Amino acid sequence: TVPEELVVTARTEGGVIMGLRHESLPIHGVQFHPESVLTEGGYRMLGNWLAVVGMPEAAERAKGLSPLLRV
C-alpha cells in the first residue's frame, strides 16, 4: 500500500511500482539502477528524470543515445 500523500507515477507491466511523487511537496522517487542505461530506453529514462529534477534539456539530449560497449 502507498500512503495517501504519494502518487504512483510509473509501474512495470506487472504492476510493480517504479516511480512516486509527493502530492504537494517537490519530492520524487524512482527505482533506478545505474546499469539500467544499458537497457533499451535507459538513457531516455535518465533524461526524463533529469528533466523532472531541473534539467529540461536533458530529455531531448538523451534521445537516440545508446551505450558504447567495448568487449
Image: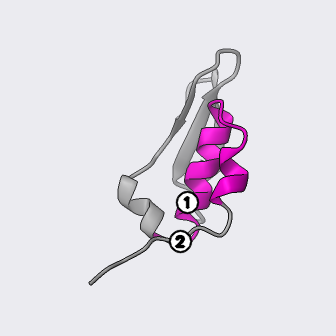
Q: Which residue is mark 2?
A: 66
Which residue is depicted at the point 46% across and 62% down?
A: 37
Query: Which three-letter amino acid code belongs to the residue tagged 1?
Result: Tyr
In this rendering, is residue 56 above or below 60?
above
**Image check: 28 left or right of 33?**
right
In this rendering, is residue 21 above or below 58?
above
Which residue is depicted at the point 38% across and 53% down?
A: 34
Please tell me which of labels 1 and 2 falls first in the chain.
Answer: 1
In this rendering, is residue 24 above or below 39?
above
Q: Specify the quadrant of the image occupied by residue 70.
A: bottom left
Dot 2 surroundings within 10 Å: few (below 14), some, or many (20 or more)?
some
Q: Can residue 45 be found in the magenta stretch?
A: yes
Which residue is depicted at the point 53% across and 62% down?
A: 42
Dot 1 surroundings within 10 Å: few (below 14), some, or many (20 or more)?
many
Residue 4 pos. (x, y %): 63, 23
Camera-side residue of 7 and 41:
41
Residue at the limit of the structure toward the left, as seen here: 71
Q: Is there a contact, CB below 8 Å, between mark 1 and mark 2? A: yes
Q: Which residue is mark 1?
A: 43
Would you say the magenta stretch is mainly helix, strand or loop? Answer: helix
Q: Quadrant of the C terminus?
A: bottom left
Residue 24 pos. (x, y %): 70, 15
Tag 1 secondary structure: helix
Label 1 and label 2: CA atoms lie apart by 7 Å
Q: Which residues are magenta?
A: 39-62
Camera-side residue of 26 and 69:
69
Residue at the limit of the structure toward the bottom, as seen here: 71
Tag 2 secondary structure: loop
Query: Which three-letter amino acid code belongs to the residue tagged 2?
Result: Ser
Residue 47 pos. (x, y %): 61, 50
Residue 59 pos. (x, y %): 69, 50
